[in-house]
Amino acid sequence: MTEPAPKLARQPSTFGLWMALTAALLGWMFDGAEMGLFSMVGNAAVENLLLNAADIDPAAVETDELLAQKTEVKKVAGRWFGIIIATFLVGAATGGVVFGWLGDRIGRVRAMSLSVLVYALFTGVCGLSRTVEELAVLRFIASLGMGGEWALGVALVMEVWPNKSRAFMAGLIGAAANVGYLVVGVVGLGLDALLKDQIPGWLGGIGLSTETIATLTAYKGWRLMMMMGTTPALLTFLIRLFVPESQKWEDENATGSTSHWATSDLLGVLIGGIGAATLIVAWAPSFSLPGVGAFVLPLPLKLLATVLGVTVAYFGYTFPVKQYLSRAFRVSGGGAAETKKTLRLMVLGALLSGVALLGTWGSTQWAPKWAGEITNNEFQSREWTQIALAAGACLGTIVAALMGDWFGRRAAYFMLCVLALASAEFLYYFNSQYDTLFLVSSFMAGACTASFYGWLPLYLPELFSTRVRATGQGFAFNFGRILAAVGALQTGVLMDAFGGSLPKAGMMMSMIYVVGMVAIWFAPETRGKPLPE
């Protein structure tokens, strides 16, 4: 009896390929826009909420006492801004695992639709925040969807497009998010004028009261800008109507292997999220305990909480994969060796991602704030610096992905670490005033430090088989955000250690790239190989 001919995988139509890419690129672009938006207005939002909580009228005549209160509020606002960034990173890490699990369980397209809907709706709700704590919680929920969208979009595009297109697709993935970041910077250039002249008229035209308009447009219009973040929700309709499901996932689903994912395993992710949240609580400016009041953890306890939090997060986030593989192997055979290999690749991917993310969030992302400090927020320095960083990043991500094909994945990552370290050190060491050199340095630092976001979408999918790809790469990239959150929380500590010097803190944080130069040689080389089945 002859063996049946092997089944040839059906390929999506050309229209389906382009719709999958379009939906993913729009999702990443909106991701970048939302992150750039908070970088631009987040500090103003926190300051606004803290002034309201302290019952300080920003328009009141300044006395010495009021000036001292405002100065203290600004100091605390800077710390809370770092806390909310860390909260966002932790939420994205948790969402990467949850929605990655969902993508491996019910399909890339349906899970991606849900992830976009979550981050869009809750970004909009951020504009209704009454306290800084509410803002942090809402940012956390929104970031769950954002973390998931990255993992699912990467998995979908890499699975539906041919192997020969992977490097260029990866570059586009990285560039798309930075296009969004760039657009926000451009919008920021004319935002003040719009808030003063045109937007109040538009809002009045739809019947809003003068008081409501003043609330929406105050402090850089952060409430209005966050509410506009609901726009990507419309993308879910495009995804559901026109984007084809990954044939690789459908073939895997047909074998019944996707049924080994169990909802009960998400309890581990919840525990992991609690462990990650411990980091936020430990490094918060202060928190309250019943009967104790405001309380600040001493440094030794903060360090202990950091180690415990990262450990609990690791075991919690990897729990669904361990359980899935144990069930799959009971049915199909196999064993501990493959499980161990998968977990090792997840950790290695997280380390490589963490280096890239920490280098960005702990170092170059502070450049717009530094520009504002140098110029006392004149010359629209923050916005122009953000534009320079984003423009460089758009170029760097595409070149980095192509470098992965030209030189091999490992050699390319090593070179990117060298360039990122050199560009960040140059930016902070050779600039003391806002001028052309500052913007050129920002462009180069953006190109080099963000280049990893073109390399990572190329490399991470190549580490995992189809059945665990979304969850595996979702963990790898997004657990890197946990490591970055730990580092971002240390920027304030380093600034205090260096007498408030942001450049010195940024230079110290950029040394993380040395870790990447070593770690990459423990990773497998995947150039020229098809995606693992």
Image (cartoon, helix red, strand yellow):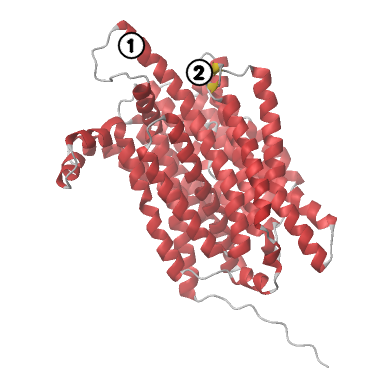
Q: Residue 67's mark? A: 1
Front label number (2 vs 1):
1
Q: Are marks 2 and 1 in contact (CB under 8 Å)?
A: no
**Residue furthest toward the front?**
291
Judged left or right of residue 236, residue 311 is right
Q: Residue at x 59, y 60 (%)?
A: 103
Q: Residue at x 30, y 30 (%)?
A: 219
Residue 324 occupies quadrant: bottom right
Q: Residue 501's mark? A: 2
Residue 308 occupies quadrant: top right
Give percent across and percent down for residue 181. 42, 44
Judged left or right of residue 314, residue 365 is left
Vertical placement of residue 268 versus 463, above or below = above
Residue type at numbered disc 2: Ser
Rate crowding at label 1 as few (under 14), some (14 to 19) or many (20 or more) other CA atoms within 10 Å. few
Judged left or right of residue 202, residue 82 is right
Which quadrant would the C terminus be assigned to in this image? Answer: bottom right
Vertical placement of residue 328 versus 506, above or below = below
Residue sitting nearer the eye, 369 or 433: 369
Residue sitting nearer the eye, 11 or 291: 291
Residue sitting nearer the eye, 23 or 498: 23
Q: Residue 78's mark? A: none
Q: Residue at x 75, y 50 (%)?
A: 343
Which quadrant would the N terminus be assigned to in this image? Answer: bottom right
Give percent across and percent down for residue 230. 37, 50
